[in-house]
Amino acid sequence: MVGGDPAAMVRGDLAATDAAAVVAHLLDNPADMQRPIAVLNGKAIIGRPAELVLDVLD
């Protein structure tokens, strides 16, 4: 739903851009997940900076 580079879902630098590698990393390191993620009506966005959440609300 968020789209783009899977590594964008991780805080900090992650060399892997493969979705499976990102999922494996987040399963081992859940605190590394980028938050907040806003979801509404089938659209999702990483809310950093917080103003990006407004894009989902439009």
Image: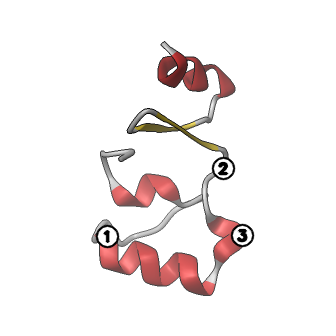
Q: Are marks 3 and 1 in contact (CB under 8 Å)?
A: no
Q: Relative to residue 41, is residue 34 depicted above or below?
A: below
- Residue depicted at 51% across the width and 80% down the height: 25
SS state under label 3: helix
- Residue depicted at 65% across the width and 67% down the height: 32
Which residue type does callout 3 highlight? Ala
Q: Relative to residue 44, is residue 20 depicted above or below?
A: below
Marks 3 and 2 sit apart, C-alpha to C-alpha, by 9 Å
Q: Dot 3: within a 10 Å radius of its alpha carbon, few (fewer than 14), some, or many (20 or more) residues?
A: few
- Residue depicted at 31% across the width and 66% down the height: 17
The residue singled out by tag 1 in the image is 19
Position of 20 with respect to 51 (left or right) is left
SS state under label 2: loop
Marks 3 and 1 sit apart, C-alpha to C-alpha, by 17 Å
Marks 2 and 1 sit apart, C-alpha to C-alpha, by 17 Å
- Residue depicted at 37% across the width and 79% down the height: 21
The residue singled out by tag 3 in the image is 31
Q: Nearer the viewer, residue 1 or 7?
A: 1
**Residue found at the very far right of the displayed protein:** 31
Position of 28 with respect to 7 (left or right) is right
Q: Earlier in the sequence, mark 3 or mark 1?
A: 1
Q: Relative to residue 20, is residue 40 depicted above or below?
A: above
The residue singled out by tag 2 in the image is 35
